[in-house]
Structures are given as structure tokens and as C-alpha cells.
Image: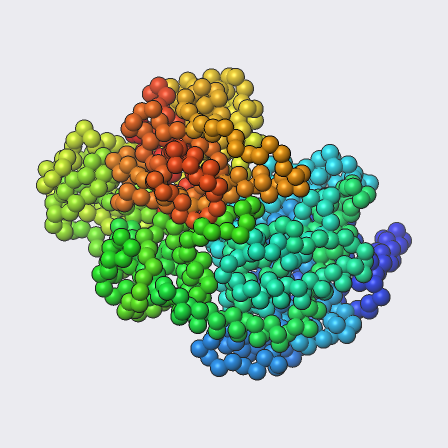
Amino acid sequence: MKKPLLSLFLGIFMCLTSQAQENYFFPGETFNPNVPSPSEFLGYKIGDWHTRYDLIVKYFEKLDELSEMASLKTIGYTHELRPKIILTIASEANMGNLEEIRLKQLQLADPSQPKPDVSTMPSIIHQGYGVHGNEPSSAEAAMLTAYWLLASQSDLAKNLRENAVVHFDPTVNPDGRDRHSHWANTNKGFPPVADPMDREHNEVWPGGRTNHYWFDLNRDWLPLAHPESQAKIAWYHTWYPNVTTDFHEMGTNSTYFFEPTKPYGSENPVVPRKNYDDINTRFAKYFSKYLDEIGSLYWTKEVFDNSYPGYGSTYPDIHGGLGLVFEQASSRGHLQSSQRGDISFEFTIRNHVRSSLATMEAALDNKNFMHDYLREFFETAVTEGAKDPTKNYVFGDEFDENRNRMFVQFLMDHQIKVYENTADLSLGGYDFKKGKSWVVPTSQPQYRMVRTMFEEVTEFADSVFYDASTWTMAHAYGMPFAAGPSVKLGEQVINNTPTPYEFPDGKAYAYLIDWSDYYAPKMLFDLQKAGIHVEIINRPFTSQTQNGPREFSAGTLMIPMGFQSLSESNLVDELKTLSMVNHQQVYATSTGFNLEGIDLGSNLVGAVTQPKVIMVVGDGVSSYEAGEIWYLLDSELGMPITKVNSDQMGRVNLYDYNTLILPSGNYNSFSESVVNHLKDWINRGGTVISMKTASLWLNQKEIIKENMVARGESTDPKELPFAERSAFEGAKQVGGSIYMARLDLTHPITYGYNRETLPVYRNNSIFVQPSKDKYLTPIRYTENPLLGGYISNKNLELLKQSASLIVSPVGRGRVINFFDSPNFRGTWFGTNKLFLNAIFFGDKMD
Ligand SMILES: [Zn+2]
């Protein structure tokens, strides 16, 4: 069929515009005509639309298909099943030898092997884009940069293909990317509207920054709570790139930021100074040159935290490479007015393309130097580790096998070597049992990550934190650990699978399950879903079990066989399966008459109601905290949770639920009738789980009546220089630090905990007095609570007088107030069980 004239004309026009566009991004360069540019492939000018992630993948598939110099690999999938891809580009010769090149790079990073001749090794460059979905310029820059590297006829491109292997991760957070792209595209006007008030520039809650569960993936390189980061880190350790980039956007009125970041205060103490003092400066020269050439303004050194190991630009610094953060002033949308005139999407993309090119040129010019640095980094890790007065960290919780295994796996995912502990040890006030504890020696190539996991830091060069000021992961896992002298190492852990428990034979009067194990709550919910009636025993006791007498703590689950609707054989089959799946030890007893403590039919034993949970989300609510709760219940319990938008609360009948979660937020948008309904429901027995600022709102509405800790007279100087404002005020914030709390082990909120102390995470400065009811502050801070992180002395004093958790009775119901962050970043497995206890046993807490 003949093409209509108009489409032919459009075709020619398209061809001309795409050429003009290549001139905008790559002035004066010629390209291999057999490789389509992104605009040729997509059919629109780059910058005219936000490119959907599936089209980015399609473009990379096309490059892979057309060229022997490009190869595409799927390394994992997001929650919404988008593929996580890496496109690798190098000369045909290098692509033919890719596995050999990779193994040599691993050999270079392994100080136990001879050092290879680095002059023959290509530079390994890892270009990472779009970890924040609503910072969209970088993924477009990824397509252009990959195109340039593959098709440009310039000497630099040729040289790079010969002497580098470049890995492109075009979008670290594809789910968030598509959420934002959809918003920007569907609200785009013709012509585009630059007015910042236009809907296009103002996404609805929760925005596209985060992943499916509203997590910031640029915090997840350390915690590895999500499949996107798990896939990324697994891949990272197969390459040990020399340079890794991480592209972002910031406020529309800003310019462009590249490293160095703020010296000392924002730097990570385990990273060698050479990284900051020497390498950063070498690379910065290239970024300034590339941006000077096109007249783009930029800044360096002022802020931007580079210390938290969960950033995409910091993790590589702790792995012998250079991690680089870039920030572009956002057009957020296709065109937005700023103090320097209208910023177009295309303009923001071009700056990131320039930095991508500058990074590759810098990496190439410093190829051998960066290889030597990688080697030196891991060699010094081993020697510095050997000099560390701490020879080993020993850890393990004898009461919780699943949480132990999770922590061991977590360390292994970061390539830390973990060994079995061969003898019972008493160290640092803990008893570590053989078979239930492990040893991590400091003298190993991942020494700096070992420190990241175990070290407590309380001295800081600065007092303003962009984010967490501490990240002792052993505390996040609630793991008892001690720094110790040399101990005999057992086998290195390779297979982390526990030996299955034996299921008890014979007829049972009741089955018992200890609540101490991390997966006991999941076991309980699985039992409830299967229609099995479960009770909880609220005091300690000793029962005659199939394994002989055994002591149980308060909070033990009981399945009484005389009160079940399932047949005995069906129930036992179900129980057996669930105990296997959840790795739970099930005990059987043939009598309710206990050897010690209360009997199984005591009035202190009661049915556990199946939770029906609703959580308020949407405008005014912290999406991070709501996301942490949603993800916890989905991933750890498989529990459906109703998420209701704050503006829909007027339609909710709370009597359909037994538990309401109010994440941190502002609930002033609730109408009077919503507030009255809420009051009525709590008074008649409802349970509210309230987080931090939500409790302030409940207090203001007089639903609860708790008291704040008095702050006293301000001791601030009467006047200070204007320029010192952010430093002075910033120092008053509690940016994210770890404190020791003391538990009332008889209160249901602490069921499953066996020690009186527990590290908790706090990132707010709400200080509430302990409850006037002396029984209802089950979690409070110790006398000397700071375990790690920055806090001002004044705030520390206020904290000592305040509560971590209080229960406020309201009529027949109650509010359980959390003032810390039990579910922080999906990785505080030491404290998220407190939250699960509130869900299962809320009605037993006052
Ligand atoms: Zn960002």
C-alpha cells in the first residue's frame, strides 16, 4: 500500500528533528547509521514524553539484537514484575572475552590471589539511573548515553569500547518510574504548561519517588529489604565496578550538583581518605569541564550526605570503587518555570548525559589507577582488620533460630564470611551457645562492611544529618553480639538452611508453640486462616511435653484439641505442614495439668482473635511509614490489610475491623463525624495502633490524654549569624539513631522477647512522659540509652525522661502509642515483632 503523503512528510520531519536533537546532545558527532537513536526508535523527540519503562527495555533489547557490542541481561524482577536489566557495552573483542574479564576483576578484588596485570584490564564502569521514579531525566539520559557509546564514531567512544566494559542500569526503580511517567504524560498539555501550579508538576500521594511499597530504594543498598536491591547487590558482587554512578534530581530552582560532597561531616568513616581527598577531585575536573562547555551552572561540597552505606553512591565507596552522586534541578514535568526561566525536560536530560560521558572519560583516563586502588582497598581491608583490637564479632540469639538465619543470610548477601561458633562462650554480658551462635572475623576482605554491621558510632565531625547517623545492622536485627578476642572458628557457613524440626507423634491434648521465634506470628496467622482455634497463655509455665518437661514464657500459643472445628487428622496434617513451612517447633502435651505455673485452662489463657486491620493512608500520612507497615504485613505475615485514603474515612464503618493503624501524619482533615465515629468505636473495644505524630493528634482531640516532657527554658543564644541557621537548627533534630530500651517482659507487647533490654530506632523529637498508669509504659529508655548515632545533649536528657511505648486505655478499647520506629526501612527485625504483637494481642494490652 502506498503511504499517504502526510505520513511520508511526517517521516521526513521526524528524521530531521531527531538529527537536530542528536546535535543538541552530541554536537558535531557522527553515528553508525545502523543503530537507531532513542528518538528514531521511539518515534518522538527525547524530552517530549516520559518514556515508559517497557519502551526503555525494548530499546535496550533492540541494541542487544543489532550489535555484537551490546548484551542485555535480566538480573531480577520488581514487585510489579518489571524486569531489572543490565545492558553491557564493549568492543566485540571484549564482549567475546566478557567472562574472562569478569573473573580477572574478581581476582583483582581478592587479596588472597595474585594481582593480575592491570594494564591489560578494561575499566569496569557501572552507570546507574533513576533510583527515584519521579526524578525522570536520568533514564532518558541512560538511553542516549548507551546509544552514544555504541554508535558514536568519535575517538573517545572507540577508546571506551576498547578499554572499558560499561554496564547500564537504566532504571533502578522501574515501578516508581512508571507511576511518575504515567502522571507526567497523562497531565501533559499541548503546548506544555510551565506554571508550577499546574497538575502536571504536582503528583498525587505517594508520588513516584519510591517503589511499590513506598520505600526509598536509595536507602536499600544496605538493608536489602526489596527485590530490586537484592538483585542489584547480587549482581554488583559479580563485577566490583571501578566506578558507579547514581543520578538524581533536586528542586527546580537549583542548578546541578556533583561530588565531592561536604568534606568529613557527610563522609563515611570506614572509607579510605584517598577516595575523598584524591579520587573525587580527579573525577570532579571532568564533570566541571563537560558542564562548563555547555554553560550549565553547578555546585559541589556544600551538602549531600555521602555517609549512609545504603545509598547507591556510598555502597561502592565501601567496595573499592568510586560511587558518584549527581543531582539535576528538576523540570518535574516537561517544562517548568524557575528563577532562571523555563527549564525543559530535554535540558535536564542533557546535563545528565554530559556527566555520564564525563564519568566514562575520567574512568578511562584513570583506568590503571582505579584498578590499583581497588586492589589496595581490599588488601588494606585484610591488614587493617588484622590490626583491629576486635578480632571477632560473635552473635546469635538462642531463642530465635529464624532471626539468626535471616541475619546470617544478610551478612552473606554482602559477601561477609561467617563461621560456626564451636564452643559455648560468655562475652559482653551474653551467653553464646554452640550451634546457636556464629563468628565473624574482622580480618577479611569485607572488613569495612563488618564494621558497618557491628560498630556503634557516637562521635561525629558534624551534627546535621540528611538521613540516619547510624546503621549498626546487628542492632536492627535485635541480635545479641559481642566484640571479642580470637576464638576458634568452625566451618564457614555456605548452606544456611536449618535442620527441620521433628513433629511430635501420638495423640495430643494440646499443642504448644513458643512465641520467641521470628516466624511465630506468621505461624499464628496461617493457623487462623486455616480455621484452627488458637489461644495464648499469658504467664510462664512448665509443661510435660513429648520431649520431657519444658519451660515456656508468657505468650506461648496453645492449640487445645477439644475445641476445634477441624477433624483431628485434618488439623494435625495442617499443623505439620505449617510447622515445616514456617520452621516452627511444635510441642505436644497429653495433659493440661502443668508441672509449674498456671494450667492450660487458666483464666489467664484466652482465645486470640483473628486481626482485621485497616490503615489510613493518603494525604497527610507518612508514605514511608505506611509503606513499611504494609510491606511488613504482606511479606512477613501474608496478611491482607485495608489501606483507606484519609479523605475516604467518612465512608468507613470501623466496626468491620478490630484494629486501626494511624501511621505518623496529620489527621486534621478528618471531619467531626469521622472523629466521633472513631471515639465511639475505640470506646466499645477497638484497638488503635498509633505512630508518633498520630499520637499528638489523638492527644489534641482528647481521645488520649498523655503529657509531653517539659522542654524547659531555651538556652539558645539571643542572636546568631544568618548563615549559621541551618547548621544550628539542624543540630537539634534527631536524625536517626539507636537507643537501648528496657522492656516489661510481662506485658503482651513484649511477648516473644527474652531479654530485658532491646535496641530501638528513633528519628523524631517527640518526647512523651511515661503513662500515669504505672503498668502501662512497657517500653522505656535505659538510664544511659545512646547506642549509636548523633543526638544533642539536651535532647538526650529529654529522651531519658520519656517513653518509647505507652498504652492509653480508652473506654473498653485502647491506643497503643509507638514513639520509635519499630519497622524502620523494613529491616528492624529486632523491633517489628513489637508491632506484630500490637496487632495480634492489642485487646490484651490494657
Ligand atoms: Zn533522588
What residue is shown at x 26% (from left), y 38% (from top)? 745
Residue 488 in percent (x, y) is at 28, 69
In-image side of 689 versus 486 (left or right): right
Q: Position of residue 130 (x, y in %)?
A: 63, 53
On the question of residue 335 being in view, the answer is yes
Q: Residue at x 82, y 40 (%)?
A: 191
Determine if residue 1 is in view. no
In the shown orientation, is residue 212 left or right of residue 843? right
Front-most of residues 524 and 628: 628
> Picture coordinates of residue 202 (x, y %)?
68, 37
- Where residue 38 appears, as percent x and y from the top left, is 74, 59
**Res. 670 image quadrant:** top right
> Which residue appears at 54% of the width and 81% of the height?
116
92 relative to 533, above or below: below
The quarter of the image holding the N terminus is: bottom right
Instruction: Tally the numbered discs.
Output: 0
Indicate the colouring scheme.
Answer: rainbow
Res. 320 image quadrant = bottom right
The outermost residue toward the front is 718
Left or right side of 281 for 631:
left
| Residue 357 shown left or right of residue 261 in the figure | right
Q: Quadrant of the C terminus?
A: top left
| Residue drawn at 37 percent across, 65 percent down | 389
